[in-house]
Image (cartoon, grey):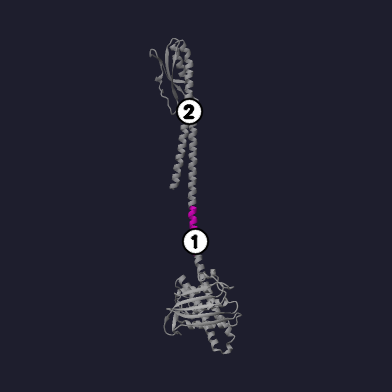
Amino acid sequence: MRKTFNGLSIRFGISAAMLSASLILVQVLFFTLQKSQIEITKNLVQSILRQEVNVSNSFLMARAITDLQRLGLISCTRLVSQKTSQVLLDLSYEGNCTPNGLFLSGGTADFKISSLNGEVWDISFIAMSDPFFRLSLWLTRLLIVASASLGLSLLFRKIDRDRRKGEEKERENRLLQNTVKKQELQISEVSERAQKVESLATHAAQVAHDIKSPLSVISLLSSRIGSDSPEEAKLLQEAAKGIIKSAENLLANVRNRQHSQDGPKVSEQSPSSSTHHIPALIPAQSLLNLDSLCRRTLEMKRVEYKDSKVTVRLSMYSNLPDTNRQVIYDPHHLESIISNVLNNGIEAIDRDGFINMDCSLDEDFVSLEIRDSGKGIPKDILERLGKEGVSHGKTNGNGIGLLHAFQTIQSWNGQMEIQSDGQRGSTVKIRLPSFKGPDAP
C-alpha cells in the first residue's frame, strides 16, 4: 500500500511539473507575441498622428486619439505638451490603465512626436491586445489544462487498475500458498504412510533373508532323515528354531511398528484369546557364548553348502581364555549376522577357496574375524557398505543383510569393519563388549 502511495505521489508531482512548465512556456510565447503587437500598434498611432502634428492642430490630434481608443486599439491615452507641460488629453480616468501581465490584456507604450513649428508632444497609452490574440491565448491554456486533466485521469485509472491487479495477484498468491500448504500436508501424510510401508517391507525382507540359510539346511537334512545321524538331527532342530524365531521377530516388529505409529490399541478378541497390550519391541537378550554360537553357525554352513559346485574349506580358531566369556545380546540376530557374513564370503569365491573364522578376547571385548579368499570388494563399494543398501557380485543381492548387520552391531555399542584390497579376499571384523559370567546354556 505504501509503495502504491509513493508511486502515486511521484507520478502526480511529475504531471503537475509538466503542466506548470507547459503553461509557463505558453505565457512566454504569447508575451513575446504581445510585445510585437504593441510595437505594431505604436507605429500605427505614430502614422495617424503625424498628419495632425504637421499642421500643429492639437485639437485634431486629440480627436484622432479618441477615435483610436473607441476602436479598441489603445486606452488610457495622455497627450502632454513638453514645452508648456500642459495636459491636452487625459483619458486615464476611464480605469483599467494597469496592464494584466497574467492575462496579457495589453502593454504600455509611449513616444515623442514633433511638429513643424517645433512643438514636442509626449504621448503615452495602453496598446490593447487583439481579441483574436486573447482568444488564442485562452484556447491554448484550456487545451493544456484539458490535456493535463486527461493525462491525470488516465494516470489515476492506470494506478487504480494496477492496484486492483495487485490485490488480485495478492489473493492468488494467498490461494496458491494455501494450496501449496495443503499439498505439502498431503505429501507429508503420503510420505509418512510410505515410510511405514517401507519399514514393514524392510523387516519382512530381513526376515526372508535370515530364514534363507535355515531353510537350506532343512531342505538338505530332510532328505537324510532316515540316516539316524544325531548331529544332523540336532542341526535340523536348530534350523527349525531359527525359522520360528525369524517369524516371531517379524510379527513382533510389525506389531511394535503399528503400536508406536498408531498409539496403544486393544486387539480383537477371539474365542481362544483375551484382550492384551502389545508391548514395545525389545530384542530377546540373553547370555550368549560366542564360541559355541560361531561353531554351530559354521557347522550349519558346512551342511548348507555341502553339495555346492564350489569347494569351500570352512575353519574356525578360538583362543578365548575362559569358556564362560560371554556377551548379552539377541542370539538370533547375532547368529543371523554371522550367517550373512559367511554367505557373502562363500558367494564371493568363484572356484575352490577357504573361509577362516577366528574368535579372540581383546580387553573387555570379544572379537570375531572372518576372512575369505573371494574376489574382493572395490574401494568405491567398500566405502558405501553399512551406509546404504549396496551389494557387490551377487545377481539378486540388495545389500540389506550387511546394512542390517552394521546397524545392529552399532546399536549394541559394538564395532563392525570390512577390509579388502579390491582384488582378492575380504576380512570382516566384529567387536562386541563382553563380561565374564557363568557358563551360557
Whether 44 is drawn above or below 27: the answer is: above
Secondary structure of the residue carrying tag 1 is: helix
Q: Is there any visible trace of residue 285 in the rendered image?
A: no
Q: Which residue, as the protein is rendered here, is positioned at the far bottom?
A: 228
Q: Is there any visible trace of residue 135 in the rendered image?
A: yes
Could you say where residue 129 lies in the image, as x and y percent from the top left?
47, 24
Ranked by sequence position, the earlier of labels 2 and 1 is 2
Could you say where residue 120 lies in the image, as x and y percent from the top left?
42, 13
Q: Nearer the viewer, residue 255 or 364?
A: 364
Q: Nearer the viewer, residue 114 or 8?
A: 114
**Stretch of the chain drawn in magenta:** 171-188
Secondary structure of the residue carrying tag 2 is: helix
Report how many numbered discs are placed on residues in the image.
2
Judge from the rendering whether residue 14 lies leftward or rightward of residue 314; answer left or right.
left
- Quadrant for residue 96, please give it: top left
Whether 308 is drawn above or below 398: the answer is: below
Within the magenta stretch, is there residue 268? no
**Predominant secondary structure, magenta span:** helix
Q: Which residue is mark 2?
A: 30
**Which mark, residue 184?**
1
The nearer-to-camera label among 2 and 1 is: 2
- Which amino acid, by three-letter code, is at mark 2? Phe
The residue at the point 47 percent across, 11 percent down is: 54
Could you say where residue 295 lies in the image, as x and y percent from the top left?
51, 83
- Which amino acid, by three-letter code, is at mark 1? Glu
Whether 293 is drawn above or below 81: the answer is: below
Q: Residues within 10 Å of mark 2 (few under 14, many from 20)?
A: some
Q: Residues within 10 Å of mark 1 (few under 14, many from 20)?
A: few
Within the magenta stretch, is there residue 186? yes
| 3D distance between C-alphas at marks 2 and 1 | 71 Å
- Quadrant for residue 211, please give it: bottom right
